[in-house]
């Protein structure tokens, strides 16, 4: 194949991989009823007037299946961290003992599990749309190359087939991530 086409496909592959990774990270922050330090990844703390990620201010650990512990590196940040957790959308109530914040993960109701499955599917669909947008952009570039006479019709067709394979593989990765997360959620 043409060098330009190879570059376009390599770029598409890299961008699709980044979309899959982004979806994987987004899914990790969805609460499943099991304690995971990733639940607190999106929390930002107002630390002396600076917005700082919680995981930069404290050690977040899963003590057991239903308990997260947040141990601040600087004890003076404890109340700011506690406030940020309360104001966040994770729906957990912090228990502060003066040096460590404990977050008890409550058992999820069946209704809440179903809601979280919908959230997971929404996150996955965003990932799929991003991948399809990359495919659309690269297909447009391929058509432009053909119009300009840089590549022939056969080369364009082979590149489109290869691009579709990349798209299918990336969407398949997202689907398997969703399936795993859904099983994790629905397991009582």
Image (cartoon, helix red, strand yellow):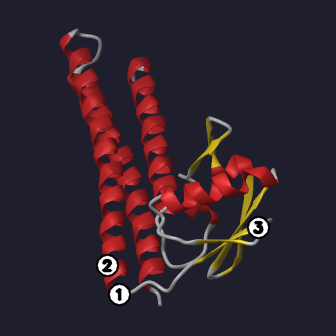
Q: Are marks 2 and 1 in contact (CB under 8 Å)?
A: yes
Few, some or many residues within 10 Å of mark 2 (<14, 14–19, 20+): some
Left or right placement of residue 7 versus residue 125 in this view: right
Few, some or many residues within 10 Å of mark 1 (<14, 14–19, 20+): few
- Element under disc 3: loop
- Element under disc 2: helix
Residue 8: percent from left, percent from top: 40, 26
For the N terminus, the quadrant is: top left
Report the Cα–Cα distance between label 3 and label 2. Answer: 32 Å
Q: What residue do we see at 36% from left, 50% from top?
A: 127
Residue receiving disc 1: 110
Q: Relative to 140, say whether 16 is above or below.
A: below
Q: What residue do we see at 56% from left, 60% from top?
A: 85
Residue receiving disc 3: 100
Q: Quadrant of residue 110?
A: bottom left
Q: Quadrant of residue 39?
A: bottom right
- Element under disc 1: helix
Left or right placement of residue 69 versus residue 31 in this view: right
Few, some or many residues within 10 Å of mark 3 (<14, 14–19, 20+): some
Q: Quadrant of residue 142?
A: top left
Residue receiving disc 2: 114
Report the Cα–Cα distance between label 3 and label 1. Answer: 31 Å
Residue 19: percent from left, percent from top: 43, 44
Q: What residue do we see at 47% from left, 90% from top?
A: 188
């Amino acid at each position: 194949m043409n060098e330009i086409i190879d570059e376009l496909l390599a770029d598409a592959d890299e961008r699709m991989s980044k979309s899959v990774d982004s979806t994987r990270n987004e899914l990790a922050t969805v609460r499943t009823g099991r304690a995971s330090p990733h639940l607190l990844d999106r929390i930002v703390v107002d630390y002396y007037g600076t917005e700082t990620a919680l995981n930069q201010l404290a050690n977040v650990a899963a003590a057991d299946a239903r308990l997260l512990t947040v141990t601040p590196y600087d004890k003076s940040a404890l109340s700011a961290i506690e406030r940020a957790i309360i104001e966040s959308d994770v729906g957990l109530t912090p228990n502060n003992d003066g040096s460590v914040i404990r977050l008890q993960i409550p058992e999820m109701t069946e209704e809440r599990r179903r809601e979280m499955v919908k959230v997971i599917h929404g996150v996955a669909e965003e990932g799929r749309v991003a991948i399809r947008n990359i495919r659309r952009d690269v297909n447009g570039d391929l058509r432009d190359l053909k119009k300009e006479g840089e590549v022939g019709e056969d080369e364009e067709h082979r590149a489109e087939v290869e691009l579709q394979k990349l798209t299918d593989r990336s969407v398949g990765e997202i689907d398997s991530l969703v399936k795993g997360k859904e099983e994790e959620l629905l397991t009582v």
